[in-house]
Amino acid sequence: MRNLFLGRKFVVLLGVLFVAALLLSLRAMPQQVNVTAPFTYPLINSSSFCAAATTGASVACSAAPAGFVGMAPSVTTLTVNTTAVTANSQIILQADSSLGTALGE
């Protein structure tokens, strides 16, 4: 019985050593992405933004890359003129009644 118990200890010890050796041989494979295309984002660091309220059909925001515009409830179409918008721009509309003071309303 004693030899059987020592044999199990030996097998467990060998198993632990095998797992330890296996873990030491593993190498981390971090995911990396190399971007080589000419990506430029000149307006991301801009502090310029548009904040305007209008009752008309258009508002001028010059070259502002971001901002918010208030429009009257009767306006159904609004044009925001800015040179920052390109074919790849994303324009997101969101209703936010808390911006009234920022727009001078």
Image: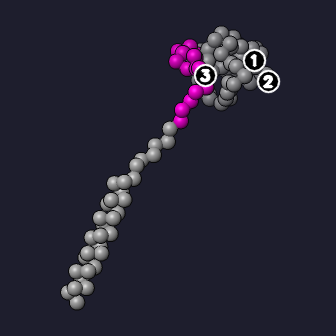
Q: Which residues are magenta?
A: 33-50
| Amino acid under disc 1 | Thr
| Residue 12 pos. (x, y %) | 29, 73
Residue found farthest to the left: 2
Q: CA distance from mark 3 to mark 2?
A: 39 Å
Relative to 50, residue 28 above or below: below
Per the image, the residue denoted by label 2 is 76
Q: Earlier in the sequence, mark 3 or mark 2?
A: 3
- Residue depicted at 65% across the width and 16% down the height: 84
Q: Helix, strand or loop at disc 1?
A: strand
Q: CA distance from mark 3 to mark 1?
A: 31 Å
The foreground one among 25 and 75 is: 25
Q: Based on the displayed image, in which of its 4 quarters is residue 98 positioned?
A: top right
Residue visible at 42% across and 47% down in the picture: 28
Q: What residue is shown with label 1? A: 79
Viewport quadrant of the N terminus: bottom left
Q: Main secondary structure of the magenta part?
A: loop
Any part of residue 10 in sight: yes
Kindly indicate whether the residue at mark 1 contacts the one at mark 3 (C-beta within 8 angstroms): no
- Image coords of residue 22 (percent x, y): 36, 59
- Left or right, 72 with reference to 11: right
- Quadrant hosting residue 20: bottom left
Question: Which sits in the foreground, 40 or 4?
Answer: 4
